[in-house]
Amino acid sequence: MTTDVGVSLWRNRDYRVFLLIQTCSALGDSFSFVAIPLLVLHSTGSVVQMGLVTGMTGVASIVTGLFAGVIADRFDRRGLLMLSDVARCLLYALIPLVWLFATPMWLIYTVVPLAGGFAMLFQVTYVAVVPAIVEPDQITRANAHLFGSYAVATVGGPTLAGFVAAAFGPVAAIGIDAATFAVSAAGLLLVRLRPTPPPDGDEEKASGGAAGGDVRGEFLAGIRFLWAHPVLRPLTVLLSLVIFLTHGMTDVIVFRVKKDLGHGDGTVGYVLSAGTVGTFLASFVVTRVRKGFGFGPSWVGATALGGVAVGCLGLTDSVPVIGALSAGMLLATGVAGICSMSLRQEVTPGHLLGRVTAAFWTTHYSLGPLGAAAVTAGAAGFGVARVCLAVGAGVVCVALGGMLTGVVRAEGAA
């Protein structure tokens, strides 16, 4: 059966096109992933300022998440994906254009959070369209492929971004990201989605759907479903704590390599590229891990291993070891994230998937900006080693706490 599923999935033309264009977009994302922290660091020399940009982007994502699910469930989802890509293309293109004449930091504080808002709209809609492209029994495998393609694109992306940033400046790398969003928007024209079956009256009433276009009621329908589910409810709480602890870790790694250890932009790219190898490996193992152990043990174990990797990051001065630990951290994060997304897509009715996804992400990302600010400020004040140990220990404790909740009974609840 596994072989038949794999073959039929690759024969799905819409899925193949979607996978290809999202790989292209991920390649561009990896450029900004490196270039934006470097641009802030070059301009201000401050890890706190890096954390501020990350935190502001998180706030924009949270605000957008309040209504992104309603939009994703109300309007044409393919059109929303294209709108999000075009908007991010134009926003990121502003940075290299303006930098030809001036270097206003206020533009970064404006453009990056706005792009983060459109990214949230894209991500919510993206999750909702996957079940409209593949069959229900292919969702975990499709998510693994999408994560794997993202990893393939981003393994070389940060290295290339580091080279581009070293040779032409970080703004050139941001310009490349803008171009990939344009390619993604054009490619989405070729993707067809199956229509989402409308809910019957009893199902809509049970889910709390609002009649008469009540946006507040529609948003609360996602909240109600999320918090009534015996697995999604504790999972949301646990992920909120994990995001609070880890949201600023990319900035901490960049600061560690560049400022603490004195390496250049190219080395930063190498380290972040090594980290994304973990995401690539996660896409290979996640289907077997979940099938073999079930959702609960897979999520708890992966999250705990990620915490151990984070805790070890500050204990070494070796760049290769930091890269390996970053890979381990993202391997664990990838397995946990793919399992979490797939479970949510499997148990949520299609007409509610946008709202449930938005409620899920808005809730568990709500502490992210505070966490990014706290972790980067802690790194500046107390040193990277102490902060990494504290964050790692916290993540392990959160993961083990999941064993006391409905998360470990996920397969039965699904």
Image: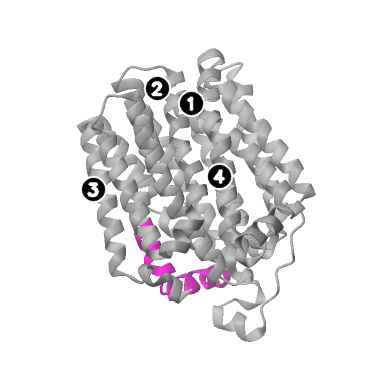
Residue under label 3 = 393
Question: Mark 2 and mark 4 in contact (Cβ < 8 Å)?
Answer: no
Residue under label 1 = 105
CA gap, disc 4 and disc 2: 35 Å
**Identity, as a three-letter code, of the amino acid under mark 1:** Met
Q: Is residue 274 magenta?
A: no
Q: Is residue 66 left or right of residue 231?
A: right
**Identity, as a three-letter code, of the amino acid under mark 3:** Ala
- Residue located at (47% from left, 37% from top): 276
Q: Quadrant of the N terminus?
A: bottom right
Residue under label 2 = 44
Element on which disc 1 rests? helix
Q: Which label number is shown at residue 365?
A: none
**Which span is picked out in magenta?**
217-239
Front position among marks 1 and 4? 4
CA gap, disc 2 and disc 3: 31 Å
Question: Mark 4 and mark 1 in contact (Cβ < 8 Å)?
Answer: no
